[in-house]
Image (spheres, helix red, strand yellow):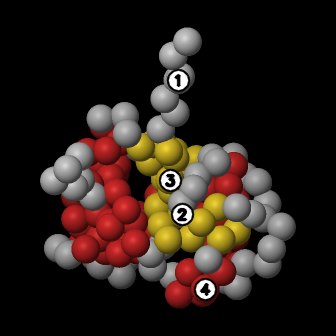
Amino acid sequence: MTQEFSPQTLAIDTNVLLSALVSRGLCHDLLNVLVRAHTSGHLVVVVPSRVLNELVSHLTGKFKIPRGLVEKHLQSLALFQQANARREPSVEIPDPDDLPIIAQALAANADPFITGDKALLALSQVDGMRIMSPREAFERFRPRAED
């Protein structure tokens, strides 16, 4: 009897994607690692729909990136699964704006949730879903020479 492989599911916060798309650095490298792992079937990467909405708002507003380029970024992220359902957490989330994102990640059964948000990182976990920094995620998911 063969055991069925079930890839790990993780979710990404707005701040990680924003950093990955507007600069080169750790979050950019992490996104590349996650794309490769997702397309090869080793991970399932979920992006809460609220994250996509915030991402568009920040890219076109704060960063003044032209809508056409934002659409290209969204097309590149379309390979990831989108989370729309919600499962309310049993703990209080420090920033009410983060609640819908956490609720969507929980409903997608994501573990971990990758964020740079210090208040969320201080929680360390929400209802069994680990909260992980981009650095921790990069160290955890990057390919190793022995892999």
Percent coordinates x, y for residue 86 in the rendering: 72, 52
Q: Amino acid at mark 1?
A: Glu
Residue at 20% from the left image edge and 50% from the top image edge: 146
**Label annotation for residue 10:** 3
Q: Mark 3: which secondary structure?
A: strand
Vertical side of 50 occupied by 79: above or below: above
Q: CA distance from mark 4 to mark 2?
A: 13 Å
Percent coordinates x, y for residue 38 in the rendering: 35, 42
Q: Amino acid at mark 2?
A: Phe
Residue at 35% from the left image edge and 75% from the top image edge: 135
Q: Mark 4: which secondary structure?
A: helix
Labels 4 and 2: the sequence-earlier one? 2
The mark lying in front, picked from 1 and 4, is 1
Q: CA distance from mark 2 to mark 1?
A: 24 Å
**Label annotation for residue 113:** 2
What residue would you read off at disc 1? 4
The mark lying in front, picked from 1 and 3, is 1
Q: In the displayed orientation, state which residue is furthest to the right.
A: 90
What residue would you read off at disc 4? 122
Residue at 56% from the left image edge and 81% from the top image edge: 121
| Left or right of residue 24: residue 89 | right
Labels 3 and 2: the sequence-earlier one? 3
Q: Quadrant of the N terminus?
A: top right
Vertical side of 8 occupied by 95: above or below: below
